[in-house]
Image (cartoon, rainbow, N blue to C red):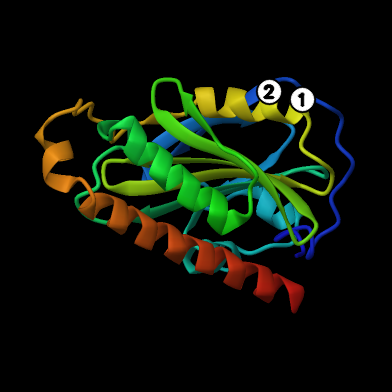
Amino acid sequence: MKKVFLSFVMLLVMPLVVNAQSVDTASAYLDLELPDSWYVFTRDNLDNNSDLEELELTKDYVMDYFLEYDLYVNAFDEDYDFYVYMNTTEDIGNLDDYYNFEVDDLAVELMNMYGADSYEIYDNDYKFIRMDYESDGYYILDYYTIIDDKSYIFSVQKLTEINNDDQVMMEEIVDSIHFDNYVDNGLNEIIIVSIGVSIVLILMLIVYIVSKRQDKKVSQETV
């Protein structure tokens, strides 16, 4: 698997910077903060973006890539690739609407799909399923959540093993996320009505996302 943009351009070596940049992605109903040293492309910031010219990319190329792989954010430097995926379905609600055993069942399915050895439930203002694994020579740390019938994956990838500094960095990014579309439903009748059915819908959605990501890897290999 080749990095999406790094397979097309030569990036300059950038110094380590601790400052953050705010990234507003209205098309995915969220905003978050990313390291200031990263290049950041979203579906919302491509117009008149000087970084496109610097990296010899076009708006149409990047947008076509985003649309093909359900991506809303791609940020990167010479060490990291960061992605935000979003898919929409119906009658799922929010991940924190569900009982713990339902979230655990979904996490186990995800863990098995990706070949991860374990998972954790990360709970800040929202609930996430967190896992790390290796795929095609890349080390990947993912956070999954479901907000307002939309499934999100926040993913960081690198060529070397995920270490504690990477985990801290990713946790800071996830802690900065604000979902504009989040409504706290609590444990109410949505749970009773949707038990089982919603889990099936979630798993179908995750299988779709996995297949899209695998297709992306194949397409990158052919470049």
| C-alpha span from label 1 to label 2 | 5 Å
The local secondary structure at tag 1 comes to helix
The residue lying furthest to the bottom in this view is 222
Q: Determine if residue 44 is in view.
A: no
Q: Quadrant of residue 173?
A: top right
The amino acid beneath tag 1 is Asp
Q: Residue at x 76, y 25 (%)?
A: 164
x and y percentages locating residue 41 in the rendered image: 59, 48
Q: Residues within 10 Å of mark 1 (few under 14, many from 20)?
A: few
Establish if 78 lies above or below 174: below
Along the viewing direction, whichever of 153 and 202 lies nearer the viewer = 202
Q: Residue at x 49, y 27 (%)?
A: 122
CB under 8 Å between discs 1 and 2: yes
Q: How many marks?
A: 2
Establish if 58 lies above or below 126: below
Find residue 168 and name its label: 2
Which residue is denoted by mark 1 in the rendering? 165
Quarter the C terminus occupies: bottom right
